[in-house]
Amino acid sequence: MPYSPVTFLSRATLAAAAAFSLIGPLNSAYAADRVIVLDSGEAELSLIDEASHKVVGTEPTGKEPHHLMITPDGKSLIVADSISNNLMFVDPHSGQVQRTVEGIEDPYQLGFSPDHKWFVTAALRMDRADIYRYDGTNMTLVKHIPLAKTPSHMTFASDSRTVFMTLQDSGELAAIDLATQTVLWKMHVGNEPAGLWMTPGDKYLLVGMTGEDDVTVVDWRKQQIVKKIHTGRGAHNFRNLDDGKHVVVSNRVESTISIIDYDTLTNVGDITGLMPGPDDMELTPDKRYLWVGFRFAKHVGIIDLSTRKLIDTIAVGRSPHGIYFDNRAPVIAPNPD
Protein backbone atom coordinates (compact mmCIF):
# COMPACT_ATOMS: atom_id res chain seq x y z
CA MET A 1 0.00 0.00 0.00
CA PRO A 2 1.40 3.47 -0.85
CA TYR A 3 2.34 5.81 1.97
CA SER A 4 -0.36 8.27 2.97
CA PRO A 5 0.90 11.49 4.58
CA VAL A 6 -1.16 13.08 7.37
CA THR A 7 -0.11 16.40 8.87
CA PHE A 8 -0.54 17.01 12.59
CA LEU A 9 -0.05 20.08 14.78
CA SER A 10 2.71 18.90 17.08
CA ARG A 11 6.41 19.13 17.95
CA ALA A 12 8.87 16.90 19.73
CA THR A 13 8.50 17.69 23.42
CA LEU A 14 6.23 16.11 26.00
CA ALA A 15 5.54 19.22 28.04
CA ALA A 16 2.00 18.33 28.94
CA ALA A 17 2.80 14.80 30.00
CA ALA A 18 5.63 16.10 32.17
CA ALA A 19 3.10 18.11 34.14
CA PHE A 20 1.68 14.87 35.52
CA SER A 21 4.89 14.36 37.52
CA LEU A 22 4.89 17.80 39.16
CA ILE A 23 4.35 17.77 42.89
CA GLY A 24 3.65 21.12 44.47
CA PRO A 25 3.95 21.99 48.16
CA LEU A 26 0.88 21.73 50.35
CA ASN A 27 0.04 25.41 49.85
CA SER A 28 0.11 25.30 46.05
CA ALA A 29 -2.94 25.81 43.86
CA TYR A 30 -3.07 24.44 40.32
CA ALA A 31 -4.28 26.47 37.39
CA ALA A 32 -6.14 23.60 35.74
CA ASP A 33 -9.60 25.02 35.12
CA ARG A 34 -11.02 22.42 32.74
CA VAL A 35 -11.49 18.68 32.77
CA ILE A 36 -12.41 17.14 29.43
CA VAL A 37 -14.48 13.94 29.42
CA LEU A 38 -15.37 11.88 26.36
CA ASP A 39 -19.05 10.90 26.29
CA SER A 40 -18.83 8.07 23.79
CA GLY A 41 -22.56 7.41 23.63
CA GLU A 42 -23.43 11.08 23.10
CA ALA A 43 -20.71 11.89 20.51
CA GLU A 44 -19.58 14.86 22.55
CA LEU A 45 -17.04 16.21 25.03
CA SER A 46 -18.19 17.35 28.45
CA LEU A 47 -16.23 20.36 29.74
CA ILE A 48 -16.06 20.38 33.54
CA ASP A 49 -14.82 23.11 35.84
CA GLU A 50 -12.40 21.33 38.16
CA ALA A 51 -12.95 23.60 41.15
CA SER A 52 -16.76 23.53 41.19
CA HIS A 53 -17.28 20.05 39.70
CA LYS A 54 -19.84 21.54 37.31
CA VAL A 55 -20.33 20.85 33.61
CA VAL A 56 -19.81 24.23 31.94
CA GLY A 57 -20.30 23.20 28.34
CA THR A 58 -20.21 20.48 25.71
CA GLU A 59 -18.55 20.14 22.31
CA PRO A 60 -19.76 17.83 19.50
CA THR A 61 -17.41 15.10 18.26
CA GLY A 62 -17.65 12.39 15.65
CA LYS A 63 -19.35 9.08 16.34
CA GLU A 64 -18.09 7.01 19.27
CA PRO A 65 -15.09 8.90 20.60
CA HIS A 66 -13.45 6.37 22.89
CA HIS A 67 -9.92 7.48 23.71
CA LEU A 68 -7.83 10.63 23.72
CA MET A 69 -4.18 11.62 23.91
CA ILE A 70 -2.21 14.85 24.15
CA THR A 71 0.19 15.61 21.30
CA PRO A 72 3.88 15.55 22.26
CA ASP A 73 4.06 19.36 22.30
CA GLY A 74 0.98 19.70 24.53
CA LYS A 75 -0.73 22.00 22.01
CA SER A 76 -3.59 19.69 21.01
CA LEU A 77 -5.66 16.92 22.50
CA ILE A 78 -6.41 14.19 19.98
CA VAL A 79 -9.88 12.64 20.19
CA ALA A 80 -10.23 9.37 18.27
CA ASP A 81 -13.69 9.11 16.64
CA SER A 82 -13.78 5.41 15.85
CA ILE A 83 -17.03 5.18 13.87
CA SER A 84 -16.52 8.50 12.06
CA ASN A 85 -13.04 7.39 10.95
CA ASN A 86 -11.31 10.61 11.97
CA LEU A 87 -9.16 12.31 14.57
CA MET A 88 -10.28 15.57 16.13
CA PHE A 89 -7.74 18.01 17.50
CA VAL A 90 -9.08 20.15 20.33
CA ASP A 91 -7.59 22.85 22.49
CA PRO A 92 -6.63 21.12 25.77
CA HIS A 93 -7.49 24.23 27.80
CA SER A 94 -10.87 25.14 26.32
CA GLY A 95 -12.03 21.97 24.56
CA GLN A 96 -12.70 23.89 21.35
CA VAL A 97 -12.08 22.02 18.11
CA GLN A 98 -8.93 23.09 16.26
CA ARG A 99 -9.26 20.81 13.25
CA THR A 100 -10.30 17.36 12.09
CA VAL A 101 -8.22 14.85 10.14
CA GLU A 102 -10.33 12.51 8.03
CA GLY A 103 -9.52 9.09 6.63
CA ILE A 104 -8.11 7.55 9.82
CA GLU A 105 -9.99 4.26 9.81
CA ASP A 106 -11.51 3.03 13.07
CA PRO A 107 -9.14 4.70 15.56
CA TYR A 108 -10.48 3.01 18.68
CA GLN A 109 -7.27 3.35 20.70
CA LEU A 110 -4.21 5.50 19.96
CA GLY A 111 -0.70 6.12 21.24
CA PHE A 112 2.66 7.77 20.62
CA SER A 113 5.84 5.78 21.16
CA PRO A 114 8.02 7.20 23.96
CA ASP A 115 10.52 8.61 21.43
CA HIS A 116 7.62 10.18 19.45
CA LYS A 117 8.77 8.57 16.20
CA TRP A 118 5.71 6.37 15.88
CA PHE A 119 1.95 6.87 16.18
CA VAL A 120 -0.20 3.76 16.47
CA THR A 121 -3.94 3.16 16.32
CA ALA A 122 -5.86 0.02 17.21
CA ALA A 123 -8.66 -0.55 14.70
CA LEU A 124 -10.90 -2.69 16.90
CA ARG A 125 -13.72 -3.50 14.46
CA MET A 126 -11.26 -3.98 11.57
CA ASP A 127 -9.01 -6.40 13.45
CA ARG A 128 -5.78 -4.57 12.74
CA ALA A 129 -3.15 -2.15 14.00
CA ASP A 130 -2.13 0.87 11.91
CA ILE A 131 1.44 2.11 12.21
CA TYR A 132 2.37 5.69 11.28
CA ARG A 133 5.85 7.21 11.10
CA TYR A 134 5.92 10.56 12.93
CA ASP A 135 8.52 13.32 12.46
CA GLY A 136 7.14 15.94 14.84
CA THR A 137 4.98 17.56 12.18
CA ASN A 138 3.84 14.95 9.66
CA MET A 139 2.56 11.42 9.94
CA THR A 140 2.92 8.82 7.24
CA LEU A 141 0.90 5.63 7.22
CA VAL A 142 3.45 2.85 6.97
CA LYS A 143 1.44 -0.34 7.30
CA HIS A 144 -1.85 -1.98 8.23
CA ILE A 145 -1.10 -5.03 10.40
CA PRO A 146 -3.81 -7.74 10.64
CA LEU A 147 -4.42 -8.70 14.27
CA ALA A 148 -7.42 -10.96 14.67
CA LYS A 149 -9.31 -10.60 16.81
CA THR A 150 -10.49 -7.23 18.21
CA PRO A 151 -7.32 -5.28 19.14
CA SER A 152 -8.20 -2.77 21.83
CA HIS A 153 -5.60 -1.43 24.28
CA MET A 154 -1.88 -0.82 23.89
CA THR A 155 1.32 0.13 25.63
CA PHE A 156 4.94 0.59 24.52
CA ALA A 157 8.32 -0.65 25.68
CA SER A 158 10.35 2.28 26.97
CA ASP A 159 12.95 1.86 24.20
CA SER A 160 10.18 2.49 21.60
CA ARG A 161 11.01 -0.72 19.75
CA THR A 162 7.84 -2.62 20.59
CA VAL A 163 4.14 -1.89 20.97
CA PHE A 164 1.94 -4.41 22.78
CA MET A 165 -1.78 -4.86 22.09
CA THR A 166 -4.52 -6.92 23.67
CA LEU A 167 -6.80 -8.89 21.36
CA GLN A 168 -10.06 -9.11 23.25
CA ASP A 169 -11.98 -11.74 21.32
CA SER A 170 -9.08 -14.13 20.80
CA GLY A 171 -7.82 -13.74 24.38
CA GLU A 172 -4.30 -12.89 23.26
CA LEU A 173 -1.50 -10.43 23.81
CA ALA A 174 0.46 -9.38 20.71
CA ALA A 175 3.89 -7.77 20.38
CA ILE A 176 4.66 -5.70 17.28
CA ASP A 177 8.11 -4.58 16.17
CA LEU A 178 7.75 -0.93 15.19
CA ALA A 179 10.83 -0.68 12.98
CA THR A 180 9.81 -3.61 10.77
CA GLN A 181 6.03 -3.42 11.36
CA THR A 182 5.86 -7.15 11.98
CA VAL A 183 4.15 -9.23 14.64
CA LEU A 184 6.90 -10.66 16.84
CA TRP A 185 4.65 -13.01 18.78
CA LYS A 186 1.21 -13.63 20.20
CA MET A 187 0.35 -15.49 23.39
CA HIS A 188 -2.90 -16.46 25.07
CA VAL A 189 -3.46 -14.64 28.36
CA GLY A 190 -7.09 -15.30 29.28
CA ASN A 191 -10.66 -14.24 28.65
CA GLU A 192 -11.20 -10.77 27.12
CA PRO A 193 -7.89 -9.01 27.83
CA ALA A 194 -8.24 -5.22 27.77
CA GLY A 195 -6.09 -2.61 29.53
CA LEU A 196 -2.30 -2.88 29.50
CA TRP A 197 0.28 -1.44 31.87
CA MET A 198 4.08 -1.78 32.01
CA THR A 199 5.62 -2.05 35.46
CA PRO A 200 8.71 0.04 36.34
CA GLY A 201 11.86 -0.98 34.51
CA ASP A 202 9.78 -2.69 31.81
CA LYS A 203 9.84 -5.81 33.98
CA TYR A 204 6.29 -7.08 33.53
CA LEU A 205 3.15 -6.33 31.58
CA LEU A 206 -0.09 -6.14 33.54
CA VAL A 207 -3.19 -7.16 31.60
CA GLY A 208 -6.71 -6.33 32.78
CA MET A 209 -8.90 -9.39 32.18
CA THR A 210 -12.36 -8.01 31.48
CA GLY A 211 -13.81 -11.51 31.06
CA GLU A 212 -12.40 -12.62 34.40
CA ASP A 213 -11.79 -11.13 37.85
CA ASP A 214 -8.06 -10.65 37.78
CA VAL A 215 -4.99 -8.99 36.33
CA THR A 216 -2.58 -11.26 34.46
CA VAL A 217 1.13 -10.59 35.04
CA VAL A 218 3.23 -11.37 31.95
CA ASP A 219 7.00 -11.69 31.65
CA TRP A 220 6.90 -10.40 28.09
CA ARG A 221 10.54 -11.21 27.34
CA LYS A 222 9.92 -14.89 28.10
CA GLN A 223 6.30 -14.79 26.92
CA GLN A 224 5.21 -16.41 30.16
CA ILE A 225 2.40 -15.73 32.61
CA VAL A 226 3.96 -15.09 36.02
CA LYS A 227 0.81 -14.95 38.14
CA LYS A 228 -2.80 -13.80 38.37
CA ILE A 229 -3.74 -10.98 40.77
CA HIS A 230 -7.33 -11.25 41.99
CA THR A 231 -9.00 -7.84 41.74
CA GLY A 232 -12.69 -7.92 40.76
CA ARG A 233 -15.02 -8.95 37.96
CA GLY A 234 -14.35 -7.14 34.72
CA ALA A 235 -10.79 -5.93 35.44
CA HIS A 236 -10.35 -3.40 32.70
CA ASN A 237 -8.08 -0.35 32.70
CA PHE A 238 -5.10 1.08 34.60
CA ARG A 239 -3.82 4.37 36.00
CA ASN A 240 -0.48 4.83 37.74
CA LEU A 241 -0.76 6.64 41.10
CA ASP A 242 2.54 8.44 40.37
CA ASP A 243 4.01 7.40 43.71
CA GLY A 244 6.43 4.85 42.24
CA LYS A 245 4.70 2.11 44.21
CA HIS A 246 1.16 1.55 43.00
CA VAL A 247 -1.12 1.31 39.99
CA VAL A 248 -4.92 1.08 40.11
CA VAL A 249 -7.18 -1.06 37.94
CA SER A 250 -10.88 -0.46 37.35
CA ASN A 251 -13.12 -3.51 37.76
CA ARG A 252 -15.95 -2.62 35.42
CA VAL A 253 -18.39 -5.41 36.39
CA GLU A 254 -17.57 -5.50 40.11
CA SER A 255 -17.80 -1.68 40.22
CA THR A 256 -14.66 -1.39 42.31
CA ILE A 257 -11.10 -0.13 41.81
CA SER A 258 -8.18 -2.24 43.05
CA ILE A 259 -4.76 -0.96 44.13
CA ILE A 260 -1.81 -3.09 42.98
CA ASP A 261 1.62 -2.95 44.62
CA TYR A 262 4.44 -2.98 42.08
CA ASP A 263 6.93 -4.78 44.34
CA THR A 264 4.73 -7.59 45.61
CA LEU A 265 2.38 -7.77 42.60
CA THR A 266 -0.56 -8.09 44.97
CA ASN A 267 -3.88 -6.35 45.44
CA VAL A 268 -3.37 -4.20 48.54
CA GLY A 269 -6.84 -2.69 48.74
CA ASP A 270 -10.13 -2.11 46.96
CA ILE A 271 -12.05 1.14 46.57
CA THR A 272 -15.75 0.31 46.93
CA GLY A 273 -19.06 2.17 47.08
CA LEU A 274 -18.79 3.24 43.45
CA MET A 275 -21.33 3.70 40.68
CA PRO A 276 -21.69 1.02 37.96
CA GLY A 277 -19.00 0.55 35.33
CA PRO A 278 -15.79 2.31 36.42
CA ASP A 279 -13.49 2.53 33.40
CA ASP A 280 -10.93 5.22 32.49
CA MET A 281 -9.30 7.11 35.36
CA GLU A 282 -7.15 10.21 35.79
CA LEU A 283 -5.29 11.86 38.66
CA THR A 284 -5.66 15.49 39.62
CA PRO A 285 -2.40 17.42 39.22
CA ASP A 286 -1.83 17.42 43.01
CA LYS A 287 -2.35 13.61 43.05
CA ARG A 288 -4.90 13.81 45.84
CA TYR A 289 -7.95 12.79 43.85
CA LEU A 290 -8.74 10.13 41.28
CA TRP A 291 -11.42 10.95 38.71
CA VAL A 292 -13.18 7.98 37.12
CA GLY A 293 -15.72 7.61 34.34
CA PHE A 294 -18.67 5.35 35.18
CA ARG A 295 -19.52 3.91 31.76
CA PHE A 296 -22.88 2.46 32.81
CA ALA A 297 -24.08 5.36 34.97
CA LYS A 298 -23.59 8.53 32.88
CA HIS A 299 -21.48 10.06 35.64
CA VAL A 300 -17.90 10.92 36.50
CA GLY A 301 -16.80 10.28 40.07
CA ILE A 302 -14.15 11.86 42.28
CA ILE A 303 -12.30 9.67 44.79
CA ASP A 304 -10.29 11.06 47.70
CA LEU A 305 -7.17 8.88 47.68
CA SER A 306 -6.37 9.65 51.33
CA THR A 307 -9.63 8.03 52.45
CA ARG A 308 -10.29 5.87 49.36
CA LYS A 309 -13.87 7.20 49.33
CA LEU A 310 -16.07 8.49 46.53
CA ILE A 311 -16.72 12.10 47.54
CA ASP A 312 -18.64 13.51 44.56
CA THR A 313 -20.25 12.58 41.26
CA ILE A 314 -20.92 14.69 38.15
CA ALA A 315 -23.65 13.89 35.64
CA VAL A 316 -22.34 13.80 32.07
CA GLY A 317 -23.42 12.15 28.81
CA ARG A 318 -23.86 8.48 28.00
CA SER A 319 -20.89 6.13 28.32
CA PRO A 320 -18.17 8.48 29.65
CA HIS A 321 -14.77 7.14 28.65
CA GLY A 322 -11.52 9.12 28.39
CA ILE A 323 -10.67 11.87 30.91
CA TYR A 324 -8.10 14.66 30.49
CA PHE A 325 -6.90 17.34 32.91
CA ASP A 326 -5.62 20.68 31.70
CA ASN A 327 -2.39 20.10 33.61
CA ARG A 328 -0.50 23.34 33.52
CA ALA A 329 2.30 24.33 35.89
CA PRO A 330 1.29 24.96 39.51
CA VAL A 331 0.71 28.49 40.74
CA ILE A 332 2.44 28.76 44.10
CA ALA A 333 0.43 30.58 46.76
CA PRO A 334 2.27 32.53 49.48
CA ASN A 335 2.72 30.86 52.84
CA PRO A 336 -0.08 31.92 55.21
CA ASP A 337 2.40 32.63 57.99
Image: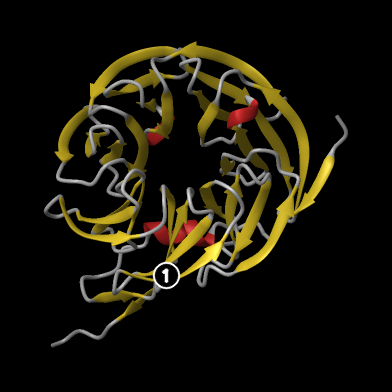
Q: Residue at x 22, y 28 (%)?
A: 231
Give the answer, above or below, for where 327 lies relative to 221. Answer: below
Give the answer, above or below, for where 270 lies relative to 80. Answer: above
Query: In the image, is 40 to the left or to the right of 85?
Result: left
Number of marks present in the image shown: 1
Give the answer, above or below, for where 137 lies relative to 254. Answer: below
- Looking at the picture, which amino acid does disc 1 mark? Arg
Instruction: Report x, y in % for residue 220.
Output: 46, 19
Image quadrant assignment for residue 90: bottom right
Q: Residue at x 53, y 67 (%)?
A: 95
Disc 1 designates what residue?
Answer: 34
Q: Residue at x 49, y 49 (%)?
A: 40
Instruction: Report x, y in % for residue 43.
Output: 54, 54
Instruction: Report x, y in % for residue 294.
Output: 32, 47
- Secondary structure at numbered mark 1: loop
- Coloring scheme of the render? secondary structure
Is there any visible trace of residue 181 in the rendered image? no
Image quadrant assignment for residue 120: top right
